[in-house]
Image (spheres, rainbow, N blue to C red):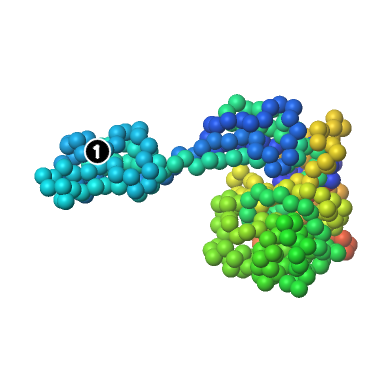
């Protein structure tokens, strides 16, 4: 039987996930191996250095750099309060005295008798890493973080914006091709992760943000709406740091595209459960996909009967594509359509553009068959 490699999106009803929760800088791990944690549990914390504020003291005091230490009221390493004097001149007449005050609360990091500047560093910024998912701590990494294991439904989207958030899953759409409109949005959706259908427009999205819904899962989206709400075009860099008040996960592509039936059925069956989502996406090298994780609360620790999915690691021998596998087309003219592999010719063939490349045959639910370059599809893990 013919085989081919293709990247894949995971749509798995039940799997064991292992999630690394790592600090950006060394810090303190607050849980131990074997602990059962909830999504909002802080598992590790550290402090990021504060911002550096340079101050040109010699210009203010009218002195030479070499004499700076004579006029300092604080020495290197001392803490300072905002508006506290840190240096002052020594005139014969007191009313002519010039005082330099600290513009921030922080620490004197450096006093330079060469440049005449002092560097103040602001207070450190605390950083806390939460578990993000309900699960069990199966390992700790000293001063860095933890690995959490959970049994969950896992669904990866094709694109997303916004970072990590958690909330109750709410199936607002009755069908995968439902189009939610602004009048459909109500207070029930506050703090929820809303499952829409094929599309939502700008006004509907603004309404969801206004009632403080935490997330939206939708089949298709208009890239013009993204530009409008962000104020800029999305580039090829990783998304996930946007601050728009909601996390958006697009499961199929851009345009009006209904959510794949299997994906919709899974989401609807888990409606009412707590879900953890992350819109972070990177399409090119080092692919990162937005994901939806819905833990099974009665099965926190994994089962030996299930395969294990790790962060950034593809499991289950998924690199082998075969006839009968479900795929999604990720290029025009059939962008977003889902079908099954109908054939895998082994030899490269000439396509409409005149290029010669390896192709496959895709059979769609309506019975039609199309020839598609293998580079233009991605598999959907069942």
Residue at 84 percent of width and 51 percent of height? 270
The residue sitting at the bottom extreme is 183
10 Å neighbourhood of mark 1: few (<14), some, or many (≥20)? some
With 60 as the anchor, is 175 left or right in this view? right
Along the viewing direction, whichever of 315 and 206 lies nearer the viewer = 206
**Residue 339 in view here:** no
Along the viewing direction, whichever of 309 and 201 lies nearer the viewer = 201
- Pointer 1 residue: 72
Residue at 75 percent of width and 57 percent of height? 192
Quarter assignment of residue 50: top left
Along the viewing direction, whichever of 163 and 297 lies nearer the viewer = 297
Q: Position of residue 66 (x, y in %)?
A: 17, 36
User: Height in image: 236 above or below 203?
Assistant: above
Q: Position of residue 262 (x, y in %)?
A: 85, 54
**Residue 125 in view here:** yes
Q: Position of residue 185 (x, y in %)?
A: 75, 68
The residue sitting at the front extreme is 94
Q: Position of residue 164 (x, y in %)?
A: 66, 49
| SS under mark 1 | loop
Q: Quadrant of the N terminus?
A: top right
User: Height in image: 202 above or below 105?
Assistant: below
Quarter assignment of residue 333: bottom right
Quarter assignment of residue 172: bottom right
């Amino acid at each position: 039987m013919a085989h081919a490699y293709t990247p894949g999106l995971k749509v798995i009803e039940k799997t064991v996930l292992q999630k690394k929760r790592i600090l950006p800088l060394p810090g303190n791990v607050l849980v131990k191996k074997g602990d059962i944690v909830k999504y909002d549990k802080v598992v590790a914390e550290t402090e990021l250095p504060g911002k550096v504020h340079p101050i040109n003291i010699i210009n203010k005091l009218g002195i030479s750099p070499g004499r700076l230490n004579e006029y300092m009221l604080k020495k290197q390493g001392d803490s300072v309060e905002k508006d506290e004097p840190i240096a002052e001149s020594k005139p014969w007449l007191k009313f002519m005295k010039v005082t330099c005050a600290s513009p921030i609360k922080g620490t004197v990091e450096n006093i330079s008798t060469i440049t005449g500047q002092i560097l103040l560093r602001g207070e450190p910024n605390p950083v806390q890493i939460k578990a993000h998912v309900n699960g069990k701590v199966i390992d700790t990494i000293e001063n860095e973080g933890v690995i959490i294991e959970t049994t969950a439904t896992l669904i990866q989207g094709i694109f997303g914006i916004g970072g990590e958030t958690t909330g109750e899953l709410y199936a607002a759409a009755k069908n995968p091709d439902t189009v939610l409109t602004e009048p459909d949005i109500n207070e029930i959706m506050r703090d929820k992760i809303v499952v829409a259908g094929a599309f939502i427009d700008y006004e509907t999205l603004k309404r969801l943000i206004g009632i403080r819904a935490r997330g939206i899962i939708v089949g298709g989206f208009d890239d013009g709406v993204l530009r409008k709400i962000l104020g800029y075009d999305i580039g090829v860099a990783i998304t996930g740091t946007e601050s728009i008040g909601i996390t958006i996960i697009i499961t199929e592509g851009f345009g009006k595209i209904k959510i794949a039936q299997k994906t919709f059925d899974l989401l609807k069956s888990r409606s009412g459960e707590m879900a953890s989502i992350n819109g972070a996406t990177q399409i090119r090298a080092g692919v990162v996909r937005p994901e939806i994780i819905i833990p099974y609360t009665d099965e926190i620790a994994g089962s030996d009967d299930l395969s294990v999915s790790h962060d950034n690691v593809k499991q289950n021998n998924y690199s082998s594509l075969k006839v009968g596998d479900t795929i999604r087309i990720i290029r025009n003219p059939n962008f977003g359509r889902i079908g099954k592999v109908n054939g895998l010719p082994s030899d490269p063939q000439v396509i409409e553009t005149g290029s010669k490349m390896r192709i496959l045959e895709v059979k769609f639910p309506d019975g039609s068959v199309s020839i598609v370059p293998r580079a233009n599809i991605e598999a959907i893990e069942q």
